[in-house]
Amino acid sequence: MNTRRYSIHMLILVTCLLVLHSVYAEEPLGHHLNPVTPHQAADFSLKDMDDNSFNLKNYVGKVVLVNFWATWCPPCRHEMPSIQTLYQRYKDKGFVVLAINEWEDSDKVFVYTGQLITAPTFPILFDRKGSVADKFSVKGLPTTVLINKKGQVVYRAIGGRDFNHPEVDKVIRTLLSE
Amino acid sequence: MRKCYIIILLLLIPRYAFSVEVTPTKNPKSGQLTWEFEEPEFSIKLIQLLPDFVSAVFSSRGLPPQVVDTLKDYCVFGTIFRNKTSGTFAYRVSDWRFITPDGKEHKVKTKDEWARQWSDMGYPFHWMFFPAEQKFGVGDWSQGFTTIKLPHGSRFNLKLIWKYQGELHHQTLENLRCAPAELPARSSGS
């Protein structure tokens, strides 16, 4: 009885996830990044899957894209390949991506990234309690901020974006050249 | 007589200017309904979610039954809200109201309220709920679950309030329906 109930529950979950994913996945991704009044980014220290610590302050002098995300969030999944493309293009020129996962653990993220055709090569950090999201006033996922070489937040995007877009490329090149 | 016409006209204007009803689309597989409202300043999509789905989604995040069960008195909509303006656009769910057929207005429970309640229960998870407030820039949008405290299958109107160019605006979305308690095929087939 319990097995049957579990199977029905799982079937409903999978069906509904597919339905919800198809609805959200159809949502078009824009590319506009909103400039904000430059202000010093709050420092943080978070760990990745392998327990390595990452401190934001160590990246002063580089351009940093901080992306707040989760595996269950359809627009987060939708935009992630474009972040990877951007990262691949500029990682050797002083561009850093820190993808901050909210609430989930390394097992869930490992399973998720294992399914991707191109797994992210940038660090994925874990913000289990949401304290870093709070520091950056993140109200929903995904939210992305761009930090200039001085450690200042200069752009922000709420909701999914196509980061593999010429306009975004131009922003990154400008920030790298400053 | 002319005065009478003017009064009637004035009474009618707000209804037609600030309320809108659209025909929902039906998912052929699940039977779930989706409403899409397009306005010059924003678009909003509301997707009926079955209670079993909502429970399963939150359970899959590791939340125990006593936490997930707190949603059982709510009907839940997947919600996508977009800024279509070329400027800033702000909203607070605490300003929104759902209106029952008796004409009464009720507050919409916000993500922050869920966060407080679940945090007190030892589970500070809130990310799947629709953000309680946002100040959107160009191209910004939010998605998440909106919760309405009504029995499954209920009908209601939803009054949205937002701020654009320093002024508050409102729009009432008419004749929304909560998802049924179960998939129609299951409820009618057994």
Image: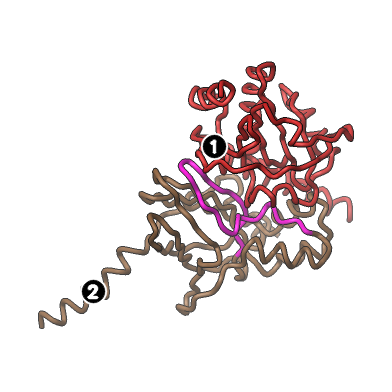
Chain colours: A red, B brown
Image quadrant of residue A157?
A: top right
Between the residue at mark 1 and the residue at mark 2, the CA separation in whole angstroms equals: 41 Å
Q: Is residue A106 visible?
A: yes
User: Dot 2 lies on which element?
Assistant: helix
Give B177 or B58, whichever is nearer the viewer: B58
Chain letter of disc 2? B
- One can see residue A23 in this view: no
**Number of on-image labels:** 2
Task: Give the quarter of the figure containing the C terminus of chain A.
Answer: top right
Which residue is nearer to you in this view: B128 or A84?
A84
A10 in relation to A58, above or below: below
Magenta residues (range): B124-147
Q: Residue A33 placed where, x, y %? A: 51, 36
- Write the residue at 82% across / 66% down: B121
Q: Does the magenta stretch include residue A35?
A: no
Task: Examine the structure image and report whether residue B134 is included in the region drawn in magenta.
Answer: yes
Q: Is mark 1 on a helix, strand or loop?
A: loop
Q: What residue type is labelled 1?
A: Glu
Q: Which mark is residue B62?
A: none
Q: In this view, does A130 lie above or below A161?
A: below
Residue position marked by numbered label 1 in the rendering: A26
Pointer 2 local density, CA inside 10 Å: few below 14, some 14–19, many at least 20 = few
Identify which residue, B68 or A33, lies in the foreground: A33
Residue A119 occupies which quadrant of the picture?
Answer: top right
Amino acid bearing label 2? Leu
In percent of width and height, residue B128 lies at 68, 52
Which is in the foreground here, disc 1 or disc 2? 2
Q: Nearer the viewer, residue A95 or A162?
A: A95
Residue picked out by circle 2: B10
